[in-house]
Amino acid sequence: MTMLKMQPVQQRDGARLRRYYQDCRYQLCEYSVGTKLMWRTTLHPAWAEVAGCLVIRNEIDGRVMYDYPVPGPGGDEQAALQAIEDDCMERGVPLVISVVPASKICGLLARYPYVTVSDIRSWRDYLYYSEDLRYFTGRHYAGQRNHIKKFQKTCPNAQFRPLTAADAPAIERFWEDFAQEFPKANEPKARRELELAKKMLRLLDRSWFLGGGMFDGDKLIALSLAERCGETLIIHIEKALYSYPGVYPALVQSFAQHYGERCRWINREDDAGERGLRTSKLQYGPAQLLSKYCFEVRTELQANVPEIPVIKSERLELSALTEADLPAYNALVLDSERNRWWGYDDVAGLGGPVEEDSFLNVARRDFAAGLAVNFAVRLEGKCIGEAVLYRFNYRGEAELGCRIARDYAGSGYGTEAFAAVADWALYKAQLSRVVAKCLRENEASRKMLASCMRPCGEDETYYYFEKKV
């Protein structure tokens, strides 16, 4: 289990991302090169290819979120989800899968026993039938048709044509004209979006971006930038000069006629919660508002264990570590000779100098973060070892480890503590499976695990065991 080797999304990565997005049928604007590039200073997206799928990790205001995997031909979505889960466990971050398309909801609900799902209104994309925007037929489009007629009467020679990189001078003049009319010049959010739009229009030399503009003679008075993803044409940018009444619906229709014939759907993205933008997009009669579901996944530890309990067995008591345990606990953790079987270097894991309470603080932080629960193994009140339940995989499984101080080895305390925590995990914490492993050369651990769990595999390094409900 390792962290994903991901790299930040850069312009040069566009072609690699398009291998997945060009046939993607999720319909949502986030599953496009344009959104990843235009909003990369907000989303901070990083990407990797896993099991034939594109995996994107975003970091928004310090919070890590993953897109749902986008499979290529023969891609394995379940393996990609497993890689995302492993990445979260290794990084010690919550598992959040965001902008999930509706078609993937049932699968994720079946996969994750404990999950909170949200559907934020301002995130929803406006999806239109391509035919509707190409022809504006029907009574509900009377307003758009009237606006276009007025525009054509005022600018009888106006024409739409595709934009290419060669149109850079006309595009720069358009931005100068637009700045003179921009009604939101004093709004930081709007100014930032405008600057991002300008940068995107400089990428018309990329084959996957589709640009178009309305010209009044040689003057560019409206422009749009889009990208085809599956059967959906995703509109990333639509801008028009306010001094040309009716040019906006004229641009929408002309762009749809030119680029939308091969697409069934046109996505004009979300409204970001802006009232004016919402009113405008609704007036064009969307076929539906596409929800973007956010899955915040919890483990059984996070959902069912508000505090570390007391577990009692025949001879032992297992409970939370305390300051009174520091001498015995530190001696246990720093016994490097015995801990060669432990499989983890506690000192290296600190990433800093060893203080008296360093290891206790790590255990407490891990529990607070929902990553692990550390039990002190007590004999007549004295800490003689530790049992740790960790690597909660979000799907009802966790790994269990146990170590006993050298002065108490050989008396069956490890087996007793291990069995007690495994039973608690299955019947109180509500896990469905507890797993464990030991190094092949550790015969004592193999016998101990075999006495209370079922063997379930081996490789060159480990023997593996499991216990199920």
Image (tube, rainbow, N blue to C red):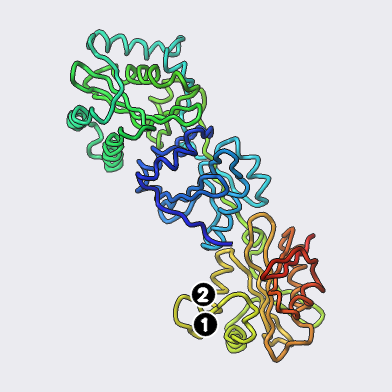
Q: Earlier in the sequence, mark 2 or mark 1?
A: 2
Res 324 visible:
no
Q: Nearer the viewer, mark 2 or mark 1?
A: 2
Residue drawn at the location 48% of the way across and 50% of the way down: 48
Residue that carries the numbered disc 1 in the rendered image? 357
Depth check: give the residue in front, 55 or 98: 55
Element at badge 2? helix
Asked if 287 appears above or below 390 in the picture, the reply is: above
Residue 61: where, in percent of width, then height?
40, 53
Res 31 visible:
yes
Image quadrant assignment for residue 205 = top left
Element at badge 1? loop
Residue 216: where, in percent of width, then height?
21, 16
Crowdedness near tag 1: few (<14), some (14–19) or many (≥20) residues, C-alpha within 10 Å? some
Image quadrant assignment for residue 411 = bottom right
Q: Horizontally, is 365 left or right of 440 in the view?
A: left
Asked if 282 appears above or below 309 in the picture, the reply is: above
Residue 146: where, in percent of width, then height?
34, 10
Residue that carries the numbered disc 2 in the rendered image? 349
Residue type, mark 2 in image: Gly
| In the image, farthest residue toward the front | 460
Residue type, mark 1 in image: Asp
Residue 256: where, in percent of width, then height?
40, 20
Q: Are the residues at dot 2 and dot 1 in contact (C-beta closer than 8 Å)?
A: no
Residue drawn at the location 67% of the way across and 63% of the way down: 398
